[in-house]
Image (spheres, rainbow, N blue to C red):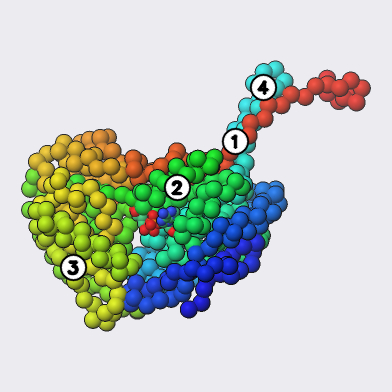
Amino acid sequence: MDLLPNLIGGQWRTPKVSGSSPVMNPSRGESLAAVPMSSAADVDEAVKEALKAFPDWRGTPPNERAQVMFRLKAMLEDEFEELAKGICREHGKTLIEARGDLRRGLEMVEYACGAPTLLMGESLENIARGIDCHTDRVPLGVVAGICPFNFPALVPMWMWPLALVCGNCFILKPSEKVPLTMQRIADLLKKAGLPDGVFSIVHGGREAVDALLEHPDVAAISFVGSTPVAEAVYQKGCLHGKRVQAAGGAKNFLVILPDADVEATATALKDSAFGCAGERCMAGSVAVAVGEAGERVLPALVDIIHSMKIGPTDVEDQPDMGALISAQHRDRVEELISLGESKGGKVLADGRNTAVAVAPDGYYVSPTVIDGIDYDNDLSTTEIFGPVLSVMRAKTLDEAIAAANRQSFGNGACVFTTSGKAAREFRHRVSAGMVGVNVGVPAPLAYFPFTGWNRSFFGDLHMQGREGVQFYTKQKTTTVRWFNFGEGDIWVK
Ligand code: NAD
């Protein structure tokens, strides 16, 4: 199996490492490539090349930097279907989901096309007589991004389009499980006219991440992944004097009130909990059914589940849901279902031991619903990251909000109701950074910040939107006064 090269100084280079990790097609349990576990020396090489490229890229006018993104956007549209199919192969999500992954990433490229406007500073004439003041946004230097497996296109593209148009050089450490999509897009970036060294890829795992966190010439780190790693990356990056934004795991609650529309809510629950096989940081994980809501909505949800087709996504005839990322992850999800059951949960739809005849070696767990989860059950607090919806019961909206606020994460929370007052109360009191009202996946688009809270985010400035621009720039404030200089200055009185 070919070892993927790193992209350093505009060249694809084979790293000098002995270790590698297989990239699998989860639909079939077959290996697609091998990813190198790059060393600190590989990281250092990438940083040195990026530092060389920085002065010229920083001096390139924002409008010219944006032109690279306009050209890239056109190329991504041309190659859209092929790239989406590639995402299906390395991740296992369905083609519709892969298109969504890429489309949301492409919207970050479109947003970055607005660089000249996004980078505008502030100024005030006459802060004192004859004195003016200007604040400019300037790039940080060499910055790096470390990504999770669940969105091979979108998550890296939360980072580098904005970082680049802000004038930084960017080093990407893709997920070792899904490195192929960015490998292809890096070629397009070069074709779009990005100078060598401005964008680099260093593959690997912990050693490469540590090297980026410790490198004195890396100014900032963007991280997305699980909470324990996000917290460790945040702490280590800060310790080494870097600006860090680190998005972590999630446990998103979906509160259903008795007045919710049954069909629409059941469909939204299905999309939220089982879309991308539950491997989304905005996936609904616990439904809190208030009063009669459970009796109204759960039977409709279980009916939908029974009509869903599970299978490989690297084929024309697409299923409704694909595989999980690895055999190890599949086993962990199945163990958690069993743990939830052993602590009193009642399994209404059981996805364990799913056999897919056409792909017997794929990593499948079918949609699972497990009712009767209470505060003592691990499923009320642990991130599962698989197609499992746990159900809690509550008598009132107050109780449901208390349940949602009890766990430690704070990415998303949703309410399903026809009452504006109840929705307003939920939005006001729930402790999560992204709220959905009759929307099961309230993930904001490129021009809004992706505002995770609590243990779902470590840092001050989030990805996407204006916060993204703020993260990748620092402000320089200049105060200006001009004196008259006697004879030569005859035209100013
Ligand atoms: P992960 O934490 O295992 O890996 C993320 C990245 O960190 C990878 O590039 C990996 O190589 C690296 N890494 C892993 N262990 C490390 C260590 N000990 N030291 C340094 N680097 C390490 O996450 P994953 O399994 O790839 O992705 C799933 C997780 O990502 C879920 O918890 C999910 O909620 C989260 N996620 C969060 C968001 C968000 O916006 N909050 C978005 C997408 C995914």
Mark carried by residue 233: 2
For the point 92% across and 22% down, the residue is 487
Residue at the extreme front: 18
Identify the residue under disc 4: 126
Queried on whether the Cβ of the residue with tag 1 lies below 8 angstroms from ligand 1, the answer reads no
**Residue type highlighted by circle 3:** Arg
Secondary structure beneath dot 1 equals strand
**Residue type highlighted by circle 4:** Asn
Return the x and y of residue 385 as percentages of the image width and height: 29, 57
Q: Describe residue 411's horizontal placement relative to residue 187 as left or right.
A: left
Instruction: Point out the frontmost of discs 1 and 3.
Output: 3
Quadrant where the C terminus is found in the figure: top right
Residue at the extreme right: 487
CA–CA distance in space, label 2 to label 4: 44 Å
Return the x and y of residue 336 as percentages of the image width and height: 21, 58
Question: How many residues crowd mark 4 within 10 Å: few (<14), some (14–19), many (20+)?
Answer: few
